[in-house]
């Protein structure tokens, strides 16, 4: 027995290092890219990594199959799956596009005995899937995230609430559980009765409104480790008891303020609260926010009712702010306050909203002067996503000069009737890319004339580490795309929106971009001949969502029918073409013949 | 009030019929012609135009004339009527699109597709002039919030 053990311990990879050493070391290698690299050293290391791999993220579920995943990583403890293209977050993808979790849940129920954490993002989840998951993995499940998912109702959640006694995280943010799918608040009641280890509860931005605040209070009393709670619309006054009970709470989001400010004098937040998301709340929240604003590290004002002045007054009281999300009502003035007061700012997201009809402060618009102040003031900035009404080359140059920690930069130029100061932005974009050498993600959406073909070439040339890009309304002609695709050596995922490149140019650029594994295009110049097929090669799936009529709400809430242009989606897959196409999606080969 | 017909050559049909070789249309060219259409349509009263377009419909390859709310269309000459003859299909597959507006009459020879596009463009432009909102580039969650905010 002793001898056998000695033999197996000294079994080595030929370099004299016993397996045992590497088996110990590998648990300290967490980064997926590092694990990928070490697993390619030799067969033995590949086997050790496969057995020891704890977490996998599959960026598109159609690139592989549940069975392949099981064979590769049988001891998985945590899995993240994504499906629908990002455009789904802007209502551009048909609801039934795909991304069904069923096959994955079935394999998990059957084989993945060690699985504790599941994260589905932009996928279709049915009540039956949740029931199976609860039955097979209920007590073992510690984290379940249904992130921007659809297809399930409170019946499915009831199974989770009943069976998942060890759930630390239940995350349902932005999942489409509509008014027809919400029967009652029983699921939360079951969760409150059966669970006392919950740490994160999130049903933010869902339409789950029949939950009872008494159940929230019960959860707060039972779960001493409750750290993060984000809910849907609920009057804050009903949560006085909840806040009193949730003594460990650090993050809260949701709720609303509908009563007179005086009534909120009894409201006090838990002592460790440092992350706050105010929804449907205006300046009447000042009395109970201002006293502890200095503690805040994260602030979400995306769905608050604050104007530019309110923003300025609040932000100047938040010197420890690291993450801010809001709408462009913050204005240049708000950005200047941010630059002056919030030196620890790491992430800033500014979404667009209506400027007319007195809904938002008209002075509250974001443009180059605010951005210049931001670049100079917030040197720790890692992530910036902003919708601007005006932009200059100079402001982009400031980012290149000051924002040395920038990893993720996204800029959209809004359509306004007034002229933009300083187009094209070729030089500014080049300066930004040259200066921000940590950039991994980059999105730029301008308008015709916003960036020339030369500018597109700069993007290709000066983004050595960028893995994801979104190009919107850039360039002048195919020449720009071809120049662009000579560079971008690290580009894995590319999204192109309304640049009107030809099919031919798109196909050539795909073949030139050596790291590309995923392409999404909308608004391209379709040709009569199937030029796009020039990018066909083994393992490359090509799909088309032909143009269709969609019903959207116009600014007045009326239903209007608009045309949604065709989408191209192409990606590497080990699983062959999809077998579950809905009517709205076709594989490209077939589509080509239809057009001819 | 001037009664002369104003003819706007949106699609450069004069140039085409003169036999000039078709230059490859770059993005800007195409946009420019749309901009011309937009500038003409933007001079019309958006509310009126919107109501007319909303009631107009396309059936059997013909544009049905949208009926104004008043009984007698001739009593309200300011209302633009979009109409196309039910007959008169040319060999090229186009019919005439006639726009009556404020005492001016414009006639265009367009295909059904182009006519639909003009209508859509006008409708889009209507919402644009009334509200500087973005058509489809705003996140779902934000749209939802803005809608709910209006309802509160």
Image (cartoon, grey):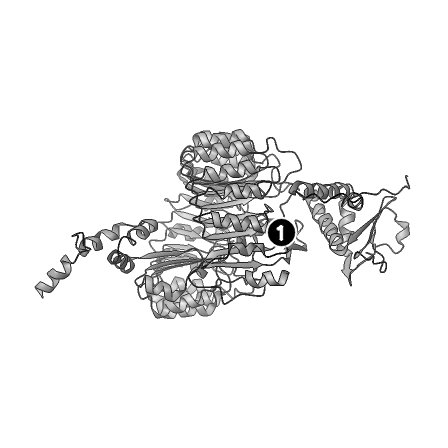
In the image, taking residue B84 as reference, residue A138 lies left or right, namely left
Percent position of residue A461, x then y: 47, 38
A533 left or right of A21 in image: right
Residue at 62% x, 50% y is A525
- Comparing A583 with A368, the one in front is A583
Q: Residue at 19%, 56% (x, y): give it.
A: A19
Residue tagged 1: B151
- Marked residue chain, label 1: B
Residue A562: where, in percent of width, then height? 66, 54
From the viewer's side, name the closer residue of A385 and A50: A50
Question: x, y percentage for residue A180?
Answer: 56, 65
Give the vertical position of B142 relative to A132 (above or below): above
Number of residues whose C-alpha sits closer than 10 Å to that of mark 1, classed few (under 14), some (14–19) or many (20 or more): few
- Which one is nearer the viewer's eye here, B92 or B76? B92
In the picture as drawn, the residue positioned furthest to the left comes out as A2
- The percent coordinates of residue A321 (x first, y second) are 42, 38
Pick the quarter of the image with the C terminus of chain A. bottom right
Q: Where A132 sits versus A493, above or below?
A: below
Quadrant position of the N terminus of chain A in the picture: bottom left
Residue A92 in view (yes/no): no
Image-based side of B138 in relation to A169, left or right: right
SS under mark 1: helix
Residue depicted at 25% across the width and 53% down the height:
A27
């Amino acid at each position: 027995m002793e001898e056998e053990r000695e033999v197996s311990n000294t079994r080595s990879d030929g370099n004299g290092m016993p397996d045992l050493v590497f088996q110990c070391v590998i648990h300290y290698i967490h980064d997926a890219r590092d694990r990928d690299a070490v697993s390619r050293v030799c067969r033995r290391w590949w086997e050790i990594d496969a057995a020891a791999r704890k977490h996998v993220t599959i960026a598109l579920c159609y690139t592989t199959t549940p069975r392949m995943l099981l064979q590769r990583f049988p001891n998985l403890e945590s899995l993240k799956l994504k499906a629908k293209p990002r455009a789904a977050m802007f209502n551009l993808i048909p609801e039934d596009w795909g991304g069904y979790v069923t096959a994955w849940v079935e394999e998990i129920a059957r084989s993945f005995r060690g699985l504790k954490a599941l994260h589905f993002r932009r996928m279709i989840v049915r009540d039956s899937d949740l029931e199976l998951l609860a039955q097979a993995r209920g007590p073992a499940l510690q984290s379940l995230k249904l992130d921007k998912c659809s297809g399930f109702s409170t019946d499915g959640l009831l199974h989770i609430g009943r069976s998942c006694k060890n759930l630390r995280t239940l995350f349902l943010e932005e999942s489409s559980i509509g008014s027809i799918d919400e029967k009652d608040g029983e699921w939360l009641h079951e969760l409150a009765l059966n669970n006392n280890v919950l740490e994160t509860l999130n049903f933010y931005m869902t339409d789950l409104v029949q939950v009872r605040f008494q159940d929230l209070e019960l959860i707060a009393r039972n779960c001493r480790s409750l750290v993060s709670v984000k809910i849907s619309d609920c009057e804050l006054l009903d949560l006085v008891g909840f806040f009193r009970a949730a003594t460990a709470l650090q993050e809260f989001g949701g709720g609303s303020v509908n009563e007179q400010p005086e009534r909120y004098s009894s409201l006090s937040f838990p002592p460790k609260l440092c992350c706050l998301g105010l929804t449907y709340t205006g300046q009447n929240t000042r009395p109970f926010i201002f006293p502890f604003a200095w503690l805040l590290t994260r602030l979400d004002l995306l769905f608050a009712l604050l104007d530019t002045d309110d923003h300025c007054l609040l932000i100047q009281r938040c010197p420890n702010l690291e993450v801010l999300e809001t709408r462009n009502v913050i204005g240049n003035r708000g950005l200047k306050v941010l630059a002056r007061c919030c030196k620890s700012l790491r992430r800033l997201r500014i979404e667009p909203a209506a400027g007319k009809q007195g809904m938002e402060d008209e002075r509250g618009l974001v443009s180059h002067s605010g951005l210049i102040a931001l670049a100079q003031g917030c040197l720790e900035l890692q992530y910036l996503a902003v919708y601007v009404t005006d932009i200059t080359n100079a402001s982009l140059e400031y980012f290149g000069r000051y924002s040395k920690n920038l990893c993720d930069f996204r800029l959209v130029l809004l359509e306004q009737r007034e002229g933009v100061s300083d187009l094209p932005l070729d030089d500014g974009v080049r300066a930004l890319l040259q200066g921000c050498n940590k950039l991994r993600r980059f999105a730029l959406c301008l308008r015709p004339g916003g960036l020339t073909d030369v500018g597109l070439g700069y993007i290709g040339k000066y983004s050595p580490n960028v893995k994801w890009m979104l190009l919107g309304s850039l360039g002048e002609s195919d020449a720009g795309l071809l120049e662009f695709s000579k560079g971008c050596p690290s580009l894995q995922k590319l999204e192109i929106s309304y640049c009107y490149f030809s099919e031919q140019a798109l196909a050539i650029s795909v073949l030139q971009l050596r790291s590309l594994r995923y392409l999404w295009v909308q608004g391209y110049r379709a040709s009569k001949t199937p030029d796009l097929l020039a990018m066909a090669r083994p393992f490359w799936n090509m799909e088309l969502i032909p143009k269709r009529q969609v019903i959207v709400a116009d600014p007045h809430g009326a239903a209007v029918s608009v045309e949604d242009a065709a989408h191209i989606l192409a990606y590497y897959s080990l699983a062959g073409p999809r077998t579950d196409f809905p009517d709205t999606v076709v594989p490209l080969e077939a589509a080509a013949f239809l057009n001819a | 009030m001037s009664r002369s017909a104003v003819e706007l050559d949106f699609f450069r049909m004069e140039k085409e019929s003169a036999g000039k070789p078709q230059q490859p249309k770059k993005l800007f060219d195409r946009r420019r012609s749309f901009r011309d259409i937009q500038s003409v349509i933007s001079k019309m009263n958006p509310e009126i135009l919107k109501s007319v377009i909303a009631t107009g419909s396309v059936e059997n390859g013909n544009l049905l004339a949208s009926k104004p709310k008043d009984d007698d269309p001739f009593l309200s000459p300011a209302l633009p009527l979009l109409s196309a003859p039910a007959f008169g299909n040319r060999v090229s597959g186009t019919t005439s699109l006639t726009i009556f507006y404020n005492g001016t009459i414009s006639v265009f020879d367009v295909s059904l597709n182009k006519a639909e596009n003009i209508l859509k463009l006008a409708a889009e432009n209507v919402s644009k002039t009334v509200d500087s909102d973005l058509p489809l580039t705003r996140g779902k969650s934000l749209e939802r919030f803005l809608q709910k905010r209006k309802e509160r």
